Image (spheres, helix red, strand yellow):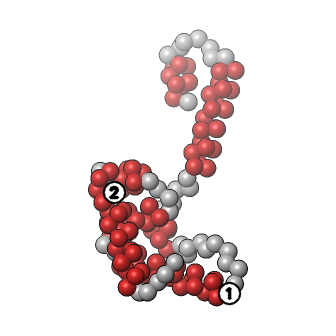
């Protein structure tokens, strides 16, 4: 759209309707693809949302899954803030480079916080006796 505005402001002749249609179509498709790729949420909203659970056939399995989810959230709450932020983004599906960009860190710093956060989470869950 910026290119169209520049062309029209420079007075480079009239733009063909087919060209304008193509620009509008491409911008719409790009926006739909971007929206589908990842639904962006605030980090605080992600942490406070209940964890979605896969369907479990029996009540005993469902109870165990709920227990594990509560323990994971508790362990996440006990992590150092930077590790918790990086690990939460990682757990919702962001890559390490995306995490670095979102948090304004270098990729190496994000990688360190994600992997140390994962180690801390494993240790916490092990101490609580939680098994997958």
Instruction: Determine the residue positioned at 70% across, 20% down.
Output: 18
Q: Secondary structure at mark 2?
A: helix
Percent across and percent down for residue 54 are 64, 72
Instruction: Determine the residue positioned at 53% across, 19% down.
Output: 7
Instruction: Determine the residue positioned at 66% across, 32% down.
Output: 25
Q: Secondary structure at mark 1?
A: helix
- How far apart in space, not on screen, are marks 1 and 2 (Cα)? 38 Å
Q: Where is mark 1, residue-wise?
A: 59
- The answer to whether marks 1 and 2 mark residues whose Cβ atoms lie closer than 8 Å is no
Residue 74 sits in which quadrant? bottom left
Q: Where is mark 2, residue-wise?
A: 111
Instruction: Determine the residue positioned at 67% across, 17% down.
Output: 16
Percent across and percent down for residue 13 are 59, 11
* Whether residue 127 is situated above or below residue 95 in the rendered picture: below
Mark drawn on residue 46? none
Q: Nearer the viewer, residue 99 or 61?
A: 61
Percent across and percent down for residue 112 are 30, 60
Dot 2 surroundings within 10 Å: few (below 14), some, or many (20 or more)? Answer: many
């Amino acid at each position: 759209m910026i290119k169209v505005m520049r062309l029209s402001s420079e007075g480079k002749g009239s733009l063909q309707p087919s060209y304008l249609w193509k620009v509008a179509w491409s911008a719409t498709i790009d926006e739909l693809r971007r929206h589908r790729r990842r639904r962006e949420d605030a980090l605080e909203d992600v942490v406070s949302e209940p964890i979605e659970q896969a369907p479990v056939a029996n009540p005993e399995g469902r109870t165990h899954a709920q227990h594990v989810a509560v323990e994971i959230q508790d362990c996440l709450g006990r992590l150092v803030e930077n590790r918790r932020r990086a690990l939460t983004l990682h757990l919702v599906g962001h890559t390490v480079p995306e995490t670095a960009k979102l948090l304004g860190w270098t990729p190496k710093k994000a990688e360190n916080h994600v992997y140390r956060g994962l180690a801390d989470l494993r240790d916490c869950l092990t101490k609580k006796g939680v098994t997958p």
